[in-house]
Amino acid sequence: MTSNIEQSLSIVVPCYNEEEVIGETVRRLRAFCASQPALRIELLFVDDGSRDGTLALLRGFAAEDARIRVIAFARNFGHQLAVTAGIEHAVGDAVLLIDADLQDPPEVAAEMIALWRQGYDVVYGTRTERPGESAFKLGAARSFYRVLNWLSDVPIPLDTGDFRLMSRQVVDTLNAMPERDRFVRGMVAWVGFRQVALPYKRAQRFAGVSKYPLRKMVRFATDGILSFSTRPLQVSITMGLAAAALALLGIVYALVARLFTDTWVEGWTALMLAVLFIGGVQLISIGILGEYVGRIYNEVKRRPLYVVRERIGAGSGAGAGDGR
């Protein structure tokens, strides 16, 4: 924690096609800034290659408000990399992550700041209610976090997103972590320090549509699981041993049928079931192994995490990261 003198806060807001909501987001964040006169606040928007008028609107807001900076990507790199870019460019004593859709109310950040001043390094929001979301999405989210905690060696808080406040020490530690496949909330849990949950009621999306369709949700879940656990490899070994055991039982059955009964000629169905079962286990195991190998491939290429097309706003070069 930093002393009360000259404290500063960076609010990082990743944006992708948020034209319908960005004006209200800026208004609410400005109101929050006005409620925190003891803090020097910068508003850092990361435009993740938006295809609508989001970037143009952000340019206008930055021109009229010196607190606003904008990092514009050359294309869409994904939410987690937009969050990463914001963390790298932030210069505050603490960094607040919040999405642009206003499902995470900016006003809750006041309680996060109070806890940070009490000495906590990470204050993460825990969702008690999620109105406006489908039963499928709610069930999938609950299942994901519980499966992830079962697989992971690092406990990751349940029912949380990226809405959190982090101290400068935590931010500097995250910036030193070079992995390509990012799962920021898991990385924050991994670094440790003093962390505390802050329960809050999530709001409905103010406008627009979710940027996380089923395909992206599955990819995100896969990144989370494979980035923090090698247990899927252990599971594939277990499946292989189970398949081998069943195959051994099949061999014993076939020998007994051949030596002691007259019904040994038949067996095409059992043979096909055994072949398909063992083949399925092998393909699953190879697929799991391939996911890990693919991540190794991404790491060794050493490409930057993201490409910045434009930096907008007063002092936009300050604390600027390069995407490594």
Image (cartoon, helix red, strand yellow):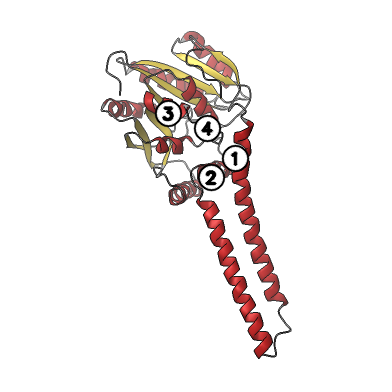
**Residue 265: % across, % down:** 74, 84
Mark 1 vs mark 4, CA separation in Å: 16 Å
Q: Secondary structure at mark 2?
A: helix
**Residue 186: % across, % down:** 45, 39
Residue closest to the eye, 35 or 268? 268
Indicate the amino acid at tag 3.
Thr
Q: Closer to the observer: label 4 or label 3?
A: 3
- Residue name at image x 43 percent, y 17 percent: 91
Q: Residues within 10 Å of mark 4 (few under 14, many from 20)?
A: some
Indicate the amino acid at tag 2.
Leu
User: In this orientation, does residue 223 appear?
Assistant: yes
Determine contact: label 4, label 2, CB under 8 Å: no
Q: Earlier in the sequence, mark 4 or mark 2?
A: 4
Identify the image quadrant of residue 72: top right
Residue 226, labelled with which disc?
2
Determine contact: label 1, label 3, CB under 8 Å: no
- Give the residue pinned by disc 4: 80
Q: Secondary structure at mark 4?
A: helix
